[in-house]
Image (tube, grey):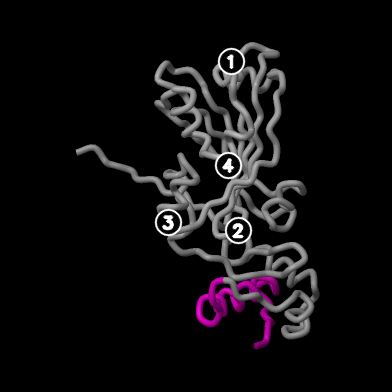
C-alpha cells in the first residue's frame, strides 16, 4: 500500500494504515513489524515510522516495550476504571485478573515541606514510605509511593505488608476506619525509572495520580502518588442533570 499524499503528513497516513490493520487484522498482544520493516515496506524514513508508532501509543492502540517491540494493546473492558480503583487488589479480582503486589521499598523518613502540607502533619514528623509495583496477569500496571503517619501505625512491619492488602492493615490491624478517599490525576509521560518498572518506553503516556485517604475523624491516614500505564486505565464520569 502506497503512502503518499500532498496534503496529509506521511506519518499520519501510516497511522491510518496501521490503525486499520489493528482494527481488522491484528489481535490483542500481536507484535507489529519493527521500525526497520515498516520503513522498508512503506518507503518511509525511520523517523516518520517512529512518529507514527508514538501516535498510536498516545491513542492507546499499541504498547511499546523497550527491547521487545510494539504490541497491540487491550482496549477491552479489562482496562481499569479509575473511578473504582479504591482497592487495586479487589478491583483486579473483580475483573477476573490475577493481581500481584511487589514491595520495592519500606522505610521511614521525616516529612518535608511538601509532604507536611499534603498530609497536614508537622514538618519533620516521622512517616512510613511504601513503594510498590502493582501488576495484573503478569503485566506491570502501576508504581505507587505511599506515605503513612508513623504515629498512627507504630508497630507496622514490612512482614505485615507481605501478607495482606494495605487497606486491611489500616482498617483491621490498626482500627483506622476509612471514610473518604480523594483521588485526582493528570496526563504525563513516563520518566526513566518508572518506564523501566512498567516495562514501557521512556516518554510513553502515563497517568500521574494523587490519592489522599481520610479516617472517620477527617484525619489523613494515607497519601499516595502513583504512576499508571495509560493504556491500562480508563476514566468514566456520570453527569446527572437535575430534574
Cα distance in 3D space between marks 2 and 4: 22 Å
Discs 2, 4 touching: Cβ within 8 Å: no
Discs 2/4, front: 2
Of mark 2 and mark 3, the one earlier in the sequence is: 3
Q: Residues within 10 Å of mark 2 (few under 14, many from 20)?
A: some
Cα distance in 3D space between marks 2 and 3: 14 Å
Q: Residues within 10 Å of mark 1 (few under 14, many from 20)?
A: few
Front residue of this view, candidates 56 and 210: 210
The residue depicted at 39 percent of the width and 45 percent of the height is: 237
Cα distance in 3D space between marks 3 and 1: 36 Å
Q: Secondary structure at mark 2?
A: strand
Residue identified by numbered label 2: 139
Q: Is residue 166 left or right of residue 38?
A: left
Residue identified by numbered label 1: 151
Q: Position of residue 178 (x, y in %)?
A: 42, 27
Front residue of this view, candidates 176 and 67: 176
Amino acid at each position: 500500500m502506497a503512502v503518499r499524499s500532498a496534503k496529509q503528513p506521511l506519518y499520519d497516513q501510516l497511522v491510518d494504515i496501521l490503525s486499520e490493520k489493528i482494527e481488522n487484522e491484528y489481535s490483542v498482544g500481536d507484535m507489529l513489524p519493527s521500525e526497520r520493516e515498516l520503513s522498508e515496506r512503506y518507503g518511509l524514513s525511520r523517523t516518520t515510522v517512529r512518529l507514527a508508532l508514538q501516535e498510536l501509543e498516545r491513542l492507546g492502540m499499541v504498547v511499546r516495550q523497550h527491547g521487545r517491540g510494539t504490541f497491540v494493546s487491550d482496549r477491552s473492558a479489562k482496562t481499569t476504571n479509575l473511578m473504582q480503583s479504591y482497592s487495586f487488589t479487589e478491583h483486579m479480582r473483580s475483573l477476573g485478573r490475577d493481581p500481584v503486589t511487589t514491595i520495592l521499598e519500606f522505610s521511614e523518613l521525616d516529612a518535608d515541606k511538601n509532604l507536611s502540607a499534603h498530609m497536614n502533619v508537622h514538618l519533620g514528623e516521622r512517616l512510613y514510605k511504601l513503594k510498590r509495583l502493582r501488576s495484573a496477569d503478569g503485566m506491570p500496571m502501576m508504581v505507587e509511593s505511599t506515605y503513612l503517619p508513623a504515629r498512627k501505625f507504630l508497630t507496622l512491619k514490612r512482614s505485615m505488608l507481605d501478607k495482606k492488602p494495605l487497606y486491611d492493615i489500616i482498617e483491621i490491624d490498626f482500627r483506622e476506619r476509612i471514610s473518604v478517599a480523594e483521588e485526582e490525576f493528570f496526563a504525563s509521560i513516563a520518566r526513566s525509572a518508572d518506564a523501566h518498572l512498567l516495562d514501557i518506553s521512556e516518554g510513553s503516556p502515563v497517568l500521574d495520580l494523587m490519592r489522599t485517604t481520610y479516617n472517620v475523624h477527617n484525619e489523613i491516614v494515607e497519601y499516595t502518588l502513583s504512576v499508571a500505564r495509560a493504556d491500562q486505565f480508563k476514566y468514566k464520569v456520570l453527569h446527572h442533570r437535575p430534574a
